[in-house]
Amino acid sequence: MTDSAPIERPAWLTSGDFTEADEPMRLFASWFEEAVRREPADPNAMALATVDAGGVPNVRMVLLKGVDERGFVFYTNRDSTKGKELEGAPKAALVFHWKSLTRQVRVRGTVEPVTDAEADAYFATRARLAQIGAWASRQSAPLESRLAFEKAVARFTAKYVVGPVPRPPYWHGYRVVPEAIEFWHDRPFRLHDRIEFRREGPGGDWTKTRLYP
Ligand SMILES: Cc1cc2nc3c(=O)[nH]c(=O)nc-3n(C[C@H](O)[C@H](O)[C@H](O)COP(=O)(O)O)c2cc1C
């Protein structure tokens, strides 16, 4: 194959034309389901961008832990840097990049906390040590040494030695309620396909626009 020859596409990648889709959450669900099957590491990893009080963007990876027609849910520490930024400006952008699928999805929208019941239910599914870790970690605060963290883990392990570990009050989920979702798929010679869906607010009708790559 020469440099300029088109890359041979596997059948599963070329079958169907996603640009024909007229509803973004169902399209996301089908791409995500494919990513879960084919992306070897963390198919649910997404970059989460927030903005600080000075208007400076901030971005880090988080894991998608729930998605439905309402939006995209992740869990974190509300007292973390991202938690404080979301408190000040409850808007966010997400990016998924599934390298094995040569696909990208971008999301922009408003952010709201999930219900306590939702957070409790998800926290209960976490591994016990991860639950202990949520108590021991003051996420994003300065940590004097690794030992100090290990001591905190030991302290909470002893405290919650019997029975279920309760959810820390600051450990919570956020839902990014989308107002714009863009789907990008690699095509030969960088003639990629892009479609963007937009709506005025939750419950509004989606309008679709094809974009130059
Ligand atoms: C693949 C990956 C997944 C991550 N998932 C989460 C997550 O779901 N929740 C979380 O709070 N931090 C997660 N982190 C850590 C964050 O990227 C970040 O370091 C941490 O949340 C502190 O960010 P902040 O100081 O901006 O609040 C993940 C990191 C990686 C690399």
Image (cartoon, rainbow, N blue to C red):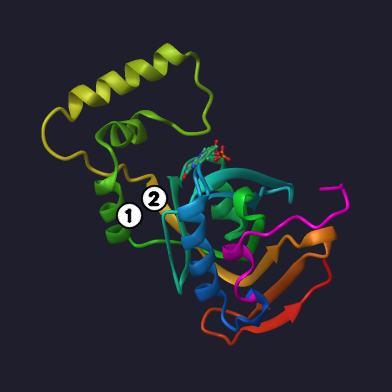
> Which one is in front, 27 or 59?
27
Residue that numbered label 1 is attached to: 119
Q: Is residue 112 above or below residue 25?
A: above
Q: Quadrant of residue 69?
A: bottom left
Q: Is residue 69 left or right of residue 206?
A: left
Q: Is 122 or 36 nearer to us in this picture?
A: 36
Nearest to the observer: residue 59 or residue 4: 4
* Overall secondary structure of the magenta section: loop
Is 211 included in the stretch rendered in magenta? no
> Image check: 78 left or right of 97?
left
Residue 88 position in % (x across, y down): 59, 54
Say what secondary structure mark 2 lies in: strand
The disc labelled 2 sits on which kind of residue?
A: His
Q: Whole-Å distance between the Cαs marked 2 and 1?
A: 6 Å
Please state if 96 lies on the left or on the right of 127 as rendered: right
Q: Around disc 2, counting alpha carbons within 10 Å, would you say few (fewer than 14), some (14 to 19), or many (20 or more)?
A: many
The kind of residue on which mark 1 rests is Ala
- Nearest the viewer among 1 and 63 is 1
Q: State the image quarter where residue 147 is shown.
A: top left
Residue 172 image point, x, y percent? 39, 50
CB under 8 Å between callouts 2 and 1? yes
Q: Residue at x 78, y 64 (%)?
A: 192
Task: Give the residues drawn in magenta, as a range.
Answer: 1-17
User: Which numbered circle lies on residue 13?
Assistant: none
Q: Is residue 11 magenta?
A: yes
Quadrant into which the C terminus falls: bottom right
* Residue at point 79%, 73% (across, down): 211
Determine if the C-beta at disc 2 is less than 8 A from ligand 1: no
| Mark number, residue 172 | 2
**What residue do we see at 85% from left, 59% from top?**
189
Image spot of residue 182 (x, y percent): 67, 68
